[in-house]
Amino acid sequence: MDDLYREIIVDRYKNPHFKGKLDAGNISFEDENPLCGDLIRIDLRVDVEGVIREAAFDGHGCAISQAAADLLVESVIGKKVDEVKKMTKQDILDMLGIELGPVRLKCALLSLKVIKAGVYGLKEADDSLVEG
Amino acid sequence: MDTIKIQADFPILERTVTGGKRLIYLDSAATSQKPVSVIASMDHYYQNMNANIHRGVHALAEEATQAYESARLRIGIFVGIKNPREIVFTRNTTESINLVAKTWGHNELNSDDLIILTTMEHHSNLVPWQMLATEKGLRLEFINLTAEGLLDVSAYQKLLNQSPKLVAFTHMSNVLGTINPAKDIIKQAHQAGAITLLDAAQSVPHLPVDLKDLEVDFAAFSAHKMCGPTGIGVLYGKEALLSKMPPFLGGGDMIKKVELRSFKPNELPHKFEAGTPAIAEAIGFGAAVDYLTEVGMDAVAKHEQELVAYALDRLDEISGVGILGPTAEKRGGVASFTVEGIHPHDVAQILDGEGIAIRAGHHCAMPLHAILGIQASSRASFYLYNTISDIDALVNGIYKAKKVFN
């Protein structure tokens, strides 16, 4: 249990490093987790070469969802959009350093779902984006 | 009330969770645990009398039919209804309310007609009316809450002046715990010429409820919140109304006579019970009301009142904890709260690590949470098997959550 609330998760929840909105963003997407009411919006500024130059998230929710969003956003800066498309559930779990049951997994994966829907230019996010 | 004796009736309470911790179950408003007598009654049905009901002439079919119909009678009597034609088995409260919306509502309501609801409704008594309102161009108005979390009676009076056709409301809020003055609300609705529907999903399991005395037109409740199995609930309706309503689902058992191009519906209550019903579950539901009758609903209500009063006092001691809803004497055994700086899901997760089961989220009442200005809350809910020491464990768990987050 105490493992679940590792220092990094509580710390990123209370003091996120990448929370806010991008004025100069050119990709943004928002979705929520109806079970918990977690909400995540991610803004990206992608250059002509497809590299993510700036990224930020906004929203509210539980510590798991918010910390995952902060860590994810940090990890994608400097990456190519195509690399983000290849990110998986495991990447998020590795960043958080925890294992999660099916209910809380949805909290952890919301930001990945949002960023993928954004980079794919989708109208609606769906769970298939983060499965496997 | 002898809680030790009662706890022994619920086998699940003997199990441990999360690394050997005793299970402390504080989520009965979502679904209650089941006593061994309920589980045994369903086992008995499957092991001794399993057969389809109403049509068979063999011994098993006779016994199964008798057991099913006897359950209906006992469940009716449990809520003050002696006429079994007025007790319709459904899947749950939600299906009962949908049944009314799709039959009575479909036939009786027309464009611009007004339905009065409250802002504390569970989605089950909101969405069916939204669906009907969209289909037929109905108006929905809501009785707001006072700052204390009670229904605003003066707002209700004003709405009644607009000649509503239906007043549908919860007897007890599943979030705030507020017990609404059902008898007054129903009486005033009738004086204004409206039909009334009571969402009794939280009240019938926890309080003595006499639907006859309330004079309500329709009422809905579920077995699984009152020591019974999932998959079965009741729609109560006055016979005069039910008999005028069209059938809900079509198929076997709901018919008297079928020809190639037409059918004649069956008598009440079978007209609303198409297809093979949840027979074992109906029998289990009967055993559940037998169990609660033996304990006594006055004793159950009194016990929960003691628990909730203690819980509110203890929660109030914790800095940063905000309690939703009114004072203890105006509510049932539900205590919803927020903890400053900690999301309800994180509170629930940390409590789970202590073996304590509570609910976190919007509890199927998203509009209510929006009105309260919060996204979610944590909810501890109590039943006859809970004790003061369960609440002490809850409070210790909340202190632990605060420690993790500070």
Image: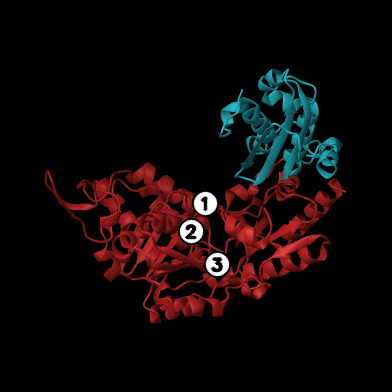
Chain colours: A cyan, B red
Task: Using the rendered image of the protein, determine whether residue B248 is visible from the camera's viewpoint.
Answer: yes
Q: Amino acid at mark 2?
A: Leu
Q: Amino acid at mark 1?
A: Val
Q: How dense is the environment of label 3, judged by Cα within 10 Å: few (below 14), some, or many (20 and up)?
A: many
SS for tag 3? Answer: loop
Tag 3–tag 2 contact (CB < 8 Å): no
Circle 2 marks a residue in which chain? B
Which percent across, then down, holds residue B322?
75, 62
Q: Amino acid at mark 3?
A: Met
> Which of the pair A29/B57 is nearer the observer?
A29
Q: In which quadrant is the N terminus of chain B drawn?
A: bottom right
Q: CA distance from mark 3 to mark 2?
A: 15 Å
Circle nearer the N terminus (3, 2): 2
Task: Using the rendered image of the protein, determine whether residue B385 is visible from the camera's viewpoint.
Answer: no
Q: How dense is the environment of label 2, judged by Cα within 10 Å: few (below 14), some, or many (20 and up)?
A: many
Q: Indicate which label's residue lies in the foreground, 3 or 1.
A: 3
Q: Which residue is mark 1?
A: B36
> Which of the pair B388/A132 is nearer the observer?
A132
Q: Which residue is mark 3?
A: B172
Q: Which residue is mark 2?
A: B126
Q: Indicate which label's residue lies in the foreground, 3 or 2.
A: 2
Which percent across, then down, holds residue B303?
63, 69
Residue B16 higher or lower than B65, as above or below:
above
For image coordinates 39% across by 48% down, the residue present is B280
For image coordinates 33% across by 64% down, the residue present is B109
Return the mark for residue B27. Answer: none
Quadrant of residue B70 in the image?
bottom left
> Which of the pair B109/B37 is nearer the observer?
B109
Circle 3 marks a residue in which chain? B
Q: CA distance from mark 3 to mark 1?
A: 27 Å
Which percent across, then down, holds residue B149?
64, 70
Circle nearer the N terminus (3, 1): 1
